[in-house]
Image: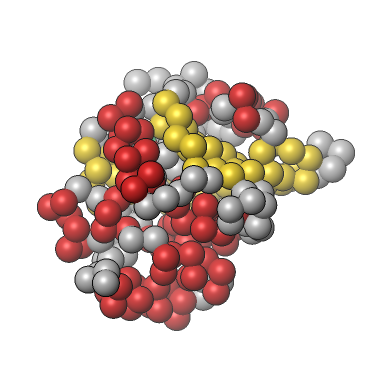
Amino acid sequence: MDPFEEKRRRMVERLREELRISEKVAKAMMKVPRHLFVPKNYEREAYIDTPLPIGFGQTISAPHMVAIMCDLLDLKEGEKVLEVGGGSGYHAAVVAEMVGKEGRVVAIERIVELAEKAKEVLNLLGYENVKVVVGDGSRGYEEESPYDKIYVTASAPDIPKPLMEQLKPGGRIVIPIGLHDQYLYVVDKDEKGKIQKRIWGPVRFVLLVGEFGFRE
Ligand code: SAM
């Protein structure tokens, strides 16, 4: 019995009522024990809709942001997804629930210790369809490309060119862009490779640090 199940249910119900997140996302979030992805001393706050520190100056995104990004990605069973900024591994687990066992999530994280911890929790929970790798995700992860969908959980100066190249035709990228004023963009690549961008709205993320990100 998961002692946090009731708290999780209430959080997901609130997100359903206030943000009208899809049932698909709600179901996935109901399955993922967020309290296992945060440091022990934040466990009790895991089902409050807020970002929380995960060490190394980084945060696990607020549940509403995870839900919104998952809905914007329009995830389908069997898709291959790249996450840039794996952090705690929580968002990757929610996406893994949505793409199912036939799908695959590759989460790239630049901080070794965070990637190791994320791997540990994801393994413990049996997420065989998630692979965590260490590296500069602003360059994407060519080894497993192309991807049906890509999402970035740190704000970039612009859409990193390698991510655009590693996206399948018909694919979508969801990415925050900006330094102080940040906006979440939804970027579509059509079958002919033509790019269309739209802004979802203002957001607040830590910065994407790397070759196609901001300098350290
Ligand atoms: N999705 C994460 C989760 O569920 O916990 C939250 C991630 S946090 C908001 C953003 C993460 O992006 C941080 O862990 C940070 O280290 C990482 N990051 C920043 N620049 C990066 C880069 N170039 N490549 C990979 N990860 C990067």
Residue 2 point in image, percent of width and height = 27, 69
Q: How many marks?
A: 0
Q: Which quadrant would the C terminus be assigned to in this image?
A: top left
Q: Residue at x 49, y 45 (%)?
A: 128
Determine if residue 12 is in view. Answer: yes
Q: Residue at x 70, y 28 (%)?
A: 165
Viewer-side residue, 105 vs 175? 105
Q: Above or below — where is 14 with respect to 105? A: below
Residue 67 point in image, percent of width and height = 47, 62
Q: Residue at x 87, y 39 (%)?
A: 192
Left or right, residue 170 beside residue 215: right
Viewer-side residue, 146 vs 100? 100
Left or right, residue 164 beside residue 69: right
Q: Residue at x 51, y 58 (%)?
A: 97
Residue 63 point in image, percent of width and height = 38, 61
Residue 48 point in image, percent of width and height = 26, 66
Viewer-side residue, 199 vs 42? 42
Q: Above or below — where is 50 with respect to 214? A: below
The quadrant in which residue 81 appears is top right
What is the basis of the colouring in this image? secondary structure
Determine if residue 204 is in view. Answer: no
Left or right, residue 157 beside residue 103: left
Hey, which residue is sitting farthest right in the picture? 192
Q: Which quadrant would the N terminus be assigned to in this image?
A: bottom left
Hey, which residue is sitting farthest left in the picture? 41
The quadrant in which residue 86 appears is top left
